[in-house]
Image: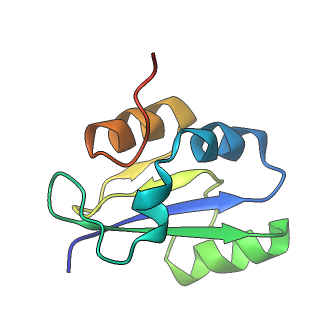
Amino acid sequence: MKTDRLFLEKNCPDCAVVRAALVMGSVTEDDFKGTSGQTFHVFSSLSNEATKELLTKFDLEGKVVPILVTHVGDIIEKPGKINAYLQGEGMAEKPE
């Protein structure tokens, strides 16, 4: 199954930039598909320690949020680049 995975953390300023741009339907609808036919999963932790544990479980140890792992295995780490990718896939609002 092709899946894009976005990792965010509460009270993370860079995560807030990404979170604010998300199309809620892409996050909340189980049958949502991106323009490449992939599903979209968002993981949001409530603490720094939980983030470290979560990233370790996904073989992203040492990385910082926000982080996006695309369905082809690319890792995108900058908020602007994450938003640009998500916009292209119909998962984030395009800027006006």
Numbered circles on residues, count: 0
Question: Is 70 located above or below residue 86 in the figure?
Answer: below
**Residue 85: x, y in percent?**
34, 40
Q: Is residue 81 above or below residue 32?
A: above
Between 26 and 65, the one nearer to me in the picture:
26
Specify whether 81 is left or right of 33.
right
Image quarter in which the N terminus is found = bottom left
25 or 74: nearer the viewer: 25
**Residue positioned 58% across, 42% down in the render:** 18
Drawn side of residue 13 relative to residue 70, left or right: right
Left or right, 31 with respect to 80, comes to: left
Color theme of the render: rainbow
Which of 18/48 is in front?
A: 18
Q: Which residue is drawn at 64% across and 36% down?
A: 17
Extreme top residue here? 96
Q: Nearer the viewer, residue 91 or 62?
A: 91
Q: Classify residue 33 by image quadrant.
A: bottom left
* Residue 72: percent from left, percent from top: 21, 61
Picture quadrant where residue 74 is located? bottom left
Can you give x and y, in whole percent of width and height, for residue 15 in the image? 67, 46
From the image, which quarter does the C terminus lie in?
A: top left
